[in-house]
Image: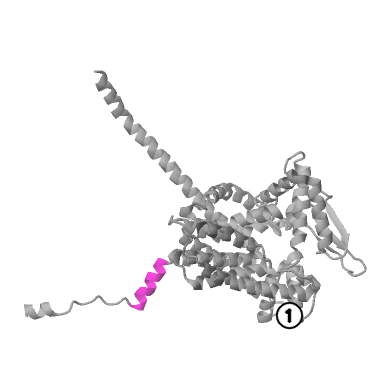
Amino acid sequence: MIASASLDPPSSPAAPSWRERFVAWLWRNRWLIAIVLATLAVRLHWNLYVHPLGHYVVSDMRGYNIRAGQLLADPWGKVEYHGFFPYGTHYLLAGLKWLFGRWNYEAVSVVYALLGTTVVGLAYTLADRVSRRRWVAPALGLILVFYYPLISLGGYMLSETPFALCLLAATNYLVRLAHEGRSRHAWLAGLFVALAVTIRPQVMISAAVFGALWLVYRRGPLRRITLRHLVCLAIPVALILGYSSYRLHFHTERRGLVSENGQFNLTFGRCHARKIMSTPNDRYRSRIMFGPPPLIQLEHREKRAPGSWIQLEPSLGPELVFPGYISDKEVLGGYIRQCMRNEGVAGQLKYSVINVMLLVGYNTMWPDSGQQYWRHTATKWGRWHIYAFTFPAILALLLAFRRKNAAHEGLVAVHVWALILLAAVFFGGTRFRCPYDPFIILLALEGYGLLFDGGRFLVARARARVHALPATTTTATTEVE
């Protein structure tokens, strides 16, 4: 019996049941699940009860709503003004109106709450992939659950929430591409970059910064991202740019890529006017006026802080008015050249520095800045962002492109450096920064980790010196004797 027992094959452990696998999955993803559920509850409560999205269809929100309605009413109609803005957001709204009804703002509120929840979930998964500190991802998720600027902007029909989702999804897949080298991740990253282009073409600056980083580290930390992967990534972007260019020409009969407001925004950045207005002429019968809230608020600073270095100081006056169409490249280009001559290199550099500073201060996030009930809350959170996140994020940002960080924090920092370049050339504002806030807060938490590690190292070295002192003293005494 003993001999026969020894010849029996060893019994293999039973495979875990689906129930055990499910419980293990729940435990493994407990932080992500809890954060996503909490975020969804907060966003739904905000969008449906505290700040109903349909009650704030004014200004920019009204513009998106009108363009979405016009697209539904006449999908093939030519509207020149539709070429002035990127089209991704009003396409999204048109799709929601087609699905749920043109005036069903509750459905739009729910979808925007879901988009905002996805933003937080993607931020958590990104932090979990790039950070070597296990506490960073849960900390980031918990902060973003209750992070007012993203909650607030998710309660308006604006581009920030879908743009943030596309940025985070693209970055998640880019990080996976850098770590695993799979072509499907390149295709998916390219798809979300292409979608981001339709919402805010500024994402192409992030693509340029990433390209520079890849050139530096293509034989090092980013070696798994091959030239073939870059082609896969570029194909969706090229296709969407081709469609966007066709669409722009269809509406305006002029050539371009996505929209015509690029030079218009550049005029604000190089001339520091608070408003630009086009008036009727022989061809155009409409009056169009825009004024970026950050620059308008900066002008008001002259009364509160006279003599301060940080002022609007418009080159050609606070308002630029011309007859014709709002995107007239000849007129706007003339303004830009004249402002650059007037201010010189030093003056333009000052404009750029102030533009970057507007990303974190000297203005309250719009639309809340125009809502008396929410203005104080938005201002308070703006200050908290400066004190809690800006300076540690700068520390991490300065170290993010080191070789050991390039495939981790470096791919996060790409977007923040792109944002700084964008603001320096055009203009900044706390609202324009908000889609990048998950990246900034992630870097800030890494900055706190670096400060903690540095402090712990200094304490350990100081203790080592203290413990070494008695031995040194004893040795010296022995030598004298």
Name the residue rendered at 60%, 51% in the picture.
385
Residue 109 percent location from the top left of the image: 64, 71
Q: Is residue 342 above or below residue 282?
A: above
Give, as a single range, the part of the protein colored magenta: 17-28
Q: Is residue 18 magenta?
A: yes
Left or right, residue 198 beside residue 173? right
Residue 438 belongs to the span the image colors magenta: no
Q: Quadrant of the C terminus?
A: top left
Secondary structure predominantly adopted by residues drawn in magenta: helix
Instruction: Give 242 or 378, whichever is nearer the viewer.
Output: 242
Do we see residue 78 in this rendering? yes
Image quarter (top left, top right, bottom left or bottom right) of the N terminus: bottom left
Tell which residue pokes out farthest to the top in this image.
481
Q: Which residue is label 1 attached to? A: 72
The residue located at (17%, 79%) in the rendering is 9
Q: Amino acid at mark 1?
A: Leu
Element at badge 1?
helix
Q: Position of residue 480 (x, y in %)?
A: 26, 18
The picture places residue 273, in percent across and down from the top left corner, at 80, 52
Q: Is residue 404 left or right of residue 57?
A: left
Q: Position of residue 86 (x, y in %)?
A: 71, 68
Q: Quadrant of residue 65?
A: bottom right
Q: Residues within 10 Å of mark 1 (few under 14, many from 20)?
A: some
Q: Residue at x 81, y 62 (%)?
A: 329
